[in-house]
């Protein structure tokens, strides 16, 4: 149930009530404190005739509604993943019996299709958001009287402050293959979101206007504004790459992986993790030695898998899976994958943060930067001003202020 609201025309505080008869408004009191006390009593007192609706019913109906309303596919998949996991744990529970500790217990051991894991950080916040959204929708549609976990707090997630600058872009380009090198170049030169670069097709390219026109983006539906990504003049690197890709790919997505398929969000995350060396670190934490170049060469040899396993001191299945992965990746012998000493938290989105920070350092006003990157001035000031990471820039600015004050 939503909070009370004040109607100036008659001086009363009201609440919105949703029941079988539809939506209606009830007077509470002309005194604000008294109105909120009555509202809290309604919130904490369970309805005696609350319907015996189970959580799985609410989640299923919410997902059907998402499909009917044609929400973005990524949003639907996001909700579907968390809600299915939640229903595997508490789906048979009636909504009126749901307590915050049910959600907390699920977060500690969430079961997904392939694994059981503890949700922490951003994943924990996203899981709580998804469950609360489904229950709030059920209140709006009249399935239930109130959301029993509306007071459950979501953990705060710190802003990403990592920048990819200096010699790091060159090192990353040298450590990866051609298709992903082009993808990283587009991120660095355009300041676009990774999802926007993945979505660019030949139909979006307007070389005369030097833009990618009408690129799908996460804020387009909310703002109603067209997202144009500026690629620079003919002398710019991104413009040159765009023209070359248009020559070879006159239709369909511009940026493809080594197998000729469009990049996916998971593939980009995996590639970045590979550059950081996260996978090798994960194997080391689990007590498993990382695969070396000599190990890969032995795994690809014509010797029997059982013999290779004894030589390497690994299980038969581990060697067989490694051989399959290497042969599937390329018909020739795979070189050892290189890693780069990236700062902690270096992800594909960090190129966008770096681009906006560079623009601000060069004196470009926030309104222009917002137009270039498809965001708002408020969002830039809140999230993207990573100038505290550039100490030299701030020191130079301080010296400039002092020199003006002396003169």
Image: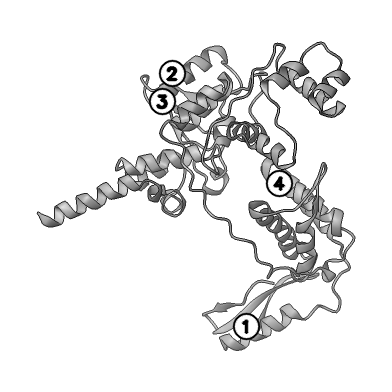
Give the spatial CA distance, label 1 vs label 4: 35 Å
- Quadrant in the rendering for residue 240: top left
The answer to whether residue 340 is left or right of residue 320 is left
**x%, y% of residue 206?**
46, 24
Q: Nearer the viewer, mark 3 or mark 2?
A: 2
Q: Which mark is residue 240?
A: 2
Identify the residue at image location x=84%, y=73%. 50
Give the spatial CA distance, label 1 vs label 3: 56 Å
Q: Earlier in the sequence, mark 1 or mark 2?
A: 1
Q: Nearer the viewer, mark 1 or mark 4?
A: 4
Q: Earlier in the sequence, mark 3 or mark 4?
A: 4
The reply to whether dot 1 and dot 2 touch (C-beta < 8 Å) is no
Give the spatial CA distance, label 3 vs label 2: 11 Å
Residue carrying label 3: 210
Q: Earlier in the sequence, mark 1 or mark 3?
A: 1
**x%, y% of residue 111?**
82, 50
Residue carrying label 4: 78
Quarter of the image with the N terminus in it: bottom right
Give the spatial CA distance, label 1 vs label 2: 62 Å
Vertical relation: 384 (above or below) 133 = above
For mark 3, give the secondary structure.
loop
Identify the residue at image location x=20%, y=49%. 400
Does residue 243 appear anywhere in the picture? yes
Q: Residue furthest left?
A: 407
């Amino acid at each position: 149930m939503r909070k009370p609201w004040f109607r100036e025309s008659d001086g009363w505080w009201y609440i919105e009530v949703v029941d079988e008869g539809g939506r209606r408004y009830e007077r509470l009191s002309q005194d604000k404190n008294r109105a909120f006390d009555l509202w809290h009593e309604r919130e904490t007192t369970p309805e005696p005739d609350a319907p015996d609706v189970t959580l799985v019913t609410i989640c299923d109906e919410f997902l059907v509604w998402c499909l009917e309303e044609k929400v973005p596919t990524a949003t639907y998949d996001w909700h579907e993943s968390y809600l299915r996991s939640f229903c595997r744990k508490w789906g048979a529970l009636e909504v009126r019996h749901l307590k915050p500790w049910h959600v907390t217990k699920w977060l500690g051991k969430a079961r997904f299709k392939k694994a059981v894991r503890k949700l922490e950080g951003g994943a924990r916040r996203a899981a709580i958001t998804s469950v609360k959204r489904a229950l709030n929708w059920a209140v709006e549609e009249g399935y239930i009287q109130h959301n029993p976990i509306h007071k459950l707090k979501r953990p705060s997630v710190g802003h990403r402050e990592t920048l990819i600058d200096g010699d790091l872009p060159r090192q990353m380009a040298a450590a990866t293959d051609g298709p992903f090198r082009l993808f990283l170049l587009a991120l660095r030169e355009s300041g676009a979101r990774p999802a926007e670069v993945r979505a660019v097709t030949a139909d979006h390219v307007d070389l005369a206007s030097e833009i990618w026109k009408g690129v799908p983006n996460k804020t387009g539906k909310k703002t109603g504004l067209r997202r144009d990504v500026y690629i620079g003049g003919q002398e710019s690197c991104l413009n040159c790459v765009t023209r070359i890709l248009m020559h070879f790919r006159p239709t369909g997505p511009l940026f493809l992986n080594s197998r000729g398929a469009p990049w996916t969000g998971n593939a980009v995350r995996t590639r970045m993790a590979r550059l950081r060396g996260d996978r090798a670190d994960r194997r080391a934490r689990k007590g498993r030695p990382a695969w070396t170049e000599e190990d890969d060469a032995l795994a690809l040899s014509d010797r029997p898998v059982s013999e290779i396993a004894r030589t390497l001191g690994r299980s038969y299945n581990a060697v067989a899976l490694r051989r399959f992965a290497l042969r599937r990746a390329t018909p020739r012998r795979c070189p050892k994958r290189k890693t780069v000493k990236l700062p902690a938290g270096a992800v594909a989105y960090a190129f966008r943060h770096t681009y906006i920070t560079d623009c601000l350092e060069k004196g470009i006003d926030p309104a222009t930067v917002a137009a270039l990157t498809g965001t708002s001035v408020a969002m830039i000031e809140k999230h993207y001003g990573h100038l505290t990471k550039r100490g030299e820039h701030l020191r130079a600015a301080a010296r400039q202020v002092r020199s003006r004050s002396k003169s």
